[in-house]
């Protein structure tokens, strides 16, 4: 059953809906027609906190969601989070948090979605770009109305604390499930709670292994491009 949880000045549904597997990483790569009933069912069930990213098939996942939302006129029903932080539209995919990357990629996200995302994360932390450069850039796009909230994904407690001292961080995303409880003890959850930052858990069902009747029993059962194969 879906419930709502406080997120800054909103109530957002929990659990949310991770859209990555529609287009990327899990060997599915659905067409818009194939994805449509899945997304309609998510709305029917109240799973309307949707998560995407530029790196999920180089923007295809964002466009898939944006096209669906416009087709069904459901922008007012969904909370959309996306992420930059990988230079996946260039010749080489790598982690980057440069100010120019953030400002360029948010424009592409808005174009593909057809609207500004509610929440925009840095997907990974770039050790070669100081937070003093990346966090003000995130804050700038927030102040410009290109996203309402900003966040970090897969960062340490120390990084989260430092980033929040530069500009208010609204959310931190990290893995959490019965299989992955590291952040109960490494300070990330405690730091988020202390600073009033929402902790957004990804893969709470353990990449599928925690669902009933999980059909995959060996690596050979997974598609060649399903990361769970390894």
Image (cartoon, helix red, strand yellow):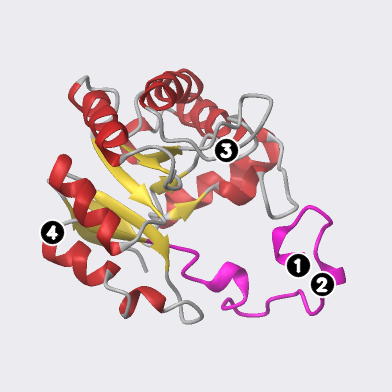
Identify the residue at horizontal 17%, vertical 66% (top origin). Answer: 193
Q: CA distance from mark 4 to mark 2?
A: 41 Å
Residue visible at 25% across and 36% down?
A: 132
Secondary element at tag 2: helix
Given contact means CB atoms under 8 Å apart, are the residues at marks 4 and 3 in contact?
no
- Give the dominant element type of the magenta stretch: helix, strand or loop: loop
Q: Earlier in the sequence, mark 2 or mark 3?
A: 3
Q: Which residue is mark 3?
A: 55
Q: Tag 1, which secondary structure?
A: loop
The span from disc 2 to disc 1 (Cα, nearest Å) is 7 Å
Q: Residue furthest right?
A: 220
Q: Which disc number belongs to residue 117?
A: none
Q: Specify start and end residues of the magenta stretch as a single range.
A: 201-230
- Taking the spot 57% from the left edge, 78% from the top edge, the residue there is 210
Residue 228 occupies quadrant: bottom right
| Relative vertical location of residue 97 with respect to residue 19 in this rendering, above or below | above
Which residue is the site of mark 2? Answer: 219
Q: Secondary structure at mark 3?
A: loop
Q: CA distance from mark 2 to mark 3?
A: 24 Å
Q: Is residue 146 above or below residue 53?
A: above
Instruction: Specify whether residue 124 is painted magenta.
Output: no
| In the image, residue 222 lies in the stretch drawn in magenta | yes
Residue 180 location (% of width, % of height): 47, 77
136 lies left or right of 46: left
- The residue at which mark 4 appears reads as 195
Tell whether label 1 touches label 2 (CB within 8 Å).
yes
Q: Name the residue carrying label 1.
A: 230
- Residue 129: name its quadrant: top left
């Amino acid at each position: 059953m879906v419930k709502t949880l406080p997120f800054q000045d909103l109530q957002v549904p929990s659990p949310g809906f991770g859209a990555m597997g529609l287009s990327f990483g899990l060997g599915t790569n659905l067409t818009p027609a194939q994805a449509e009933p899945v997304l309609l069912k998510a709305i029917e069930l109240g799973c309307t906190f949707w998560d995407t990213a530029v790196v999920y098939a180089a923007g295809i996942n964002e466009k898939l969601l944006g096209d669906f939302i416009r087709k069904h006129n459901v922008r007012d029903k969904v909370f959309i989070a996306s992420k930059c932080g990988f230079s996946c539209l260039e010749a080489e995919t790598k982690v980057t948090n440069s100010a120019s990357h953030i400002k360029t990629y948010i424009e592409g996200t808005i174009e593909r979605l057809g609207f500004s995302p509610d929440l925009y994360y840095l997907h990974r932390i770039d050790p070669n770009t100081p937070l003093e450069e990346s966090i003000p850039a995130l804050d700038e796009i927030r102040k410009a109305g290109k996203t309402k909230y900003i966040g970090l994904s897969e960062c340490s407690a120390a990084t989260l604390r430092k980033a929040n001292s530069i500009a208010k961080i609204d959310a931190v995303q990290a893995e959490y499930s019965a299989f992955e409880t590291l952040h109960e003890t490494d300070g990330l959850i405690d730091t988020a709670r202390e600073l009033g930052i929402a902790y957004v858990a990804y893969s709470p069902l353990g990449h599928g292994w925690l669902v009933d009747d999980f059909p995959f029993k060996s690596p050979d059962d997974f598609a060649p491009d399903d990361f769970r194969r390894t």
